[in-house]
Amino acid sequence: MNPNINFRFRHIALVLSIAGLTACGGESSDSSESATIVPQPGEANAPAEEQPNIDIEPTPTFKANYSPKGSFSEPFAEPTIVVDGEIVETDGKCVETADGLAECKPAAGTVALLNDGRILYLNALEGTENVELSIVAEFGEVSVNDQSRVLSLSQNDEPSWLKPSPLRAGANPDGADSETLFNNTPLAVLDGLLDTANNTDKNDGALFCSDVVGLADGSVMAVGGTDYYSEPGIDGLPLGVAELEGIKNSRIFHAGTNTWTQSGDMKYGRWYPSLVTLPDNKVLVTSGVEKLLKPVYPSDPLNSGRNIVQTEIYDPCTGTWAVNPSTADRSLPLYPRLHLLPNGHVFYNAGGQAFNPFGQGYDQALWNIAATFNPASNRWTDLGYAGLPLRLDEIGLGQLASTLNVTNISLKQASLLVGDLLGSASNLLTVASELDIDAETLKSAIGGGMRGSTSSTMLPLKPNENGEYNDAEFLTAGGVPSYALLTNPGGYLPIAQTRIDTVRTNGDDIDYESRLAGPLNQPRWYGTNVLLPDGSVMVFSGGNRDGVVVPGLEGPIKTAERFDPETGTWTEMASGIRSRTYHNTAILLPDGRVLVGGHSPINTAYLKFVDLQDFGLAPYDGRDPSFEIYTPPYAMRNDRPKILSAPEMLMPGDDFSIEVDQADAIDKVLLIRRTVMTHAVDSDQRAIELPIAKKSGNELKLAMPQKNSVVPAGQYMLFISKDTPEGRVPSVAASVSVQTPDSLQCSGGTQLVDESGNTVAPSDSPLSNLLSTLFGQR
């Protein structure tokens, strides 16, 4: 039998066996045959002999003179706005409606690279242009749910736009059940008089400040978000202060139909949560806050005054959430920087949003501690104060942060903690006496702890001499430091310091250390990192001061920088055309270029927009709906290697081959997960270096990692590259869907409901996609 045909039928047999033997959320048959056909969760399937390949489109060429710094394109934006039911073509950002309100084009505060190469993006802070005096007083009334868009770029970079349905993702069409100060209290007589949370449904389900994650089937899920209202108020009058309450919703965008559907609700409303995909294809959510400005919960007083400590797990088979046991609770900053480690644990590397002057908690000192979460045991382990050599787990304080959680500490735990602290005193002195306190250690201390408004990038995972992926490195650069004392409100000025955290895993055993790398060329707040297919990291946009402390007084940083992991240094690259500070975004495109967009600031000084660009500050005349494309130097070359054919789907443990045009020169193959990000956060961001087992003519024999924890199910891009005297030159990507036995057990979020409450099953599920792909029906 032809090995390609054999491979097709092996995967078809696997899919049909799982579909027949295992219902979503159910268990497999007890027969010995099913035990050998269906691997256990987290384990790889038996490697394939060969992969069915598809031809890759020709490498595009870009009209640009070569520059060692790269170059930015001219900005481009959606050409029309719908105003009072009419399509208006305009080069401007906004058009005034008949009611005197500004209808504006959306800015890309959230972006996701879809598996068909298009870009889904979501607006942020929609309605700020209609604030007349103060956003604090008015935004509970003038805000509206955020729009979504899909951007397509042709081979010649001609853009076109599509509006998904529903346009604003359809959450809470009948209003949200808001957690107001006067709701269900002894003062219930005042309900309706001093409670305007339910005064309107136009802003009860905003996409703004949700987190986003790419599911295995290529759909994108937005979790949490914002319910706006004024508190208190009378009959819609903005007499109180605007509140931003986290919502419980989960919404899924299906690229095949360009539609949003509703999935299950979380138990806790979350504003600024973080999501990360686990090896079993489930999704972990952490942190977020239920109420940003007034976090007082009469029905849950112990959780008042801090972020949500409870964690939850989303099951794409059932479309439902489950709360983890209290041992999984942890106080984390908003949008905590999380990453999946090669051993399946989740790493928190002490980064998050320092949402000054809000978003702080009474337990915020714990945010300075780097830690890992074990989904199997539902327990956190404290590694140490981020950036410093002291290891808490080595002196008996590995459960310090968990034990200090006020919602689950018992008298017995408290006594044990006191014993640990007393018993650790001598250990701490011993460790401290052995530390080499030099200038570098002092620098680390100054920039150690929780870093606010910073990008956290996992550098490419590399196999060791045994082909195992055990170690991971994480790049943290810029952001607002805690100055080793407090977390937030932290500093107003960002730093240039760069830190690399190294996590070494051996089963459940974890070793952690940090080192300083070369600093940025200028301090940067809210920069967005992008890992390029040559292995380097670039940072785009941001400002020179914290634009949330005093909005409108930050200076924009338009010059991009590139970090070389080999030298540990940053180099200034080309400068963008537009200034993009708060809510900026940047994503890697399949051709190796970078799409840069966003900029949706808070109104100047929390009042109304006052533009101070003439004074060298960031633009504060509303949001910027435009995009620019950054072309790195390697994409300007005419000698880029080409992938001629490659598999469309892979599974962990697969052996496969690709056809290329410069096999002798190719020395690296990189599998990069497609970006799905917001607020400088993409917890699923990862790249895996695949070893080249053999070269035969134009064919490269490659091997996938064995573990789902190294390469979780999802949508990826496969790059090859060669080394040259001028630097590494990568190819254009081949699209690859990585699936696992767990991801093939069900169609992502089958239990979905539309806006009318009807159950729906999306057509673009992993099963339908896989079968149609294998049978050539797409």
Image: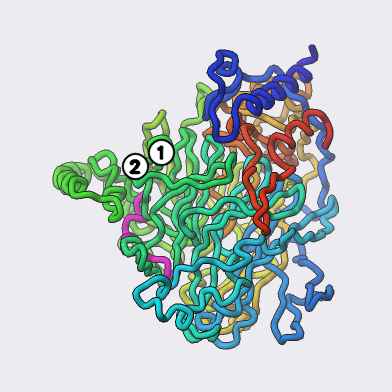
Point out residue 215 in the picture as x, y percentages from the top left corner.
62, 44
In depth, the one of 778 and 517 nearer the eye is 778
In depth, the one of 191 and 218 nearer the eye is 191
Main secondary structure type of the part rendered in magenta: loop
Q: Amino acid at mark 1?
A: Asn
Q: Residues within 10 Å of mark 1 (few under 14, many from 20)?
A: some
The region drawn magenta spans 355-369
Indicate the quadrant containing the N terminus: top left, top right, bottom left or bottom right.
top right
Residue bearing mark 1: 374
Point out residue 409 in the picture as x, y percentages from the top left corner.
25, 50
What residue do we see at 37% from left, 72% from top? 185
**In the image, which disc is placed on residue 753?**
none
What residue do we see at 36% from left, 78% from top? 187
What residue do we see at 48% from left, 74% from top? 243
**In the image, which disc is placed on residue 381?**
2
Res 701 seen here: no
Point out residue 499 in the picture as x, y percentages from the top left corner.
44, 50
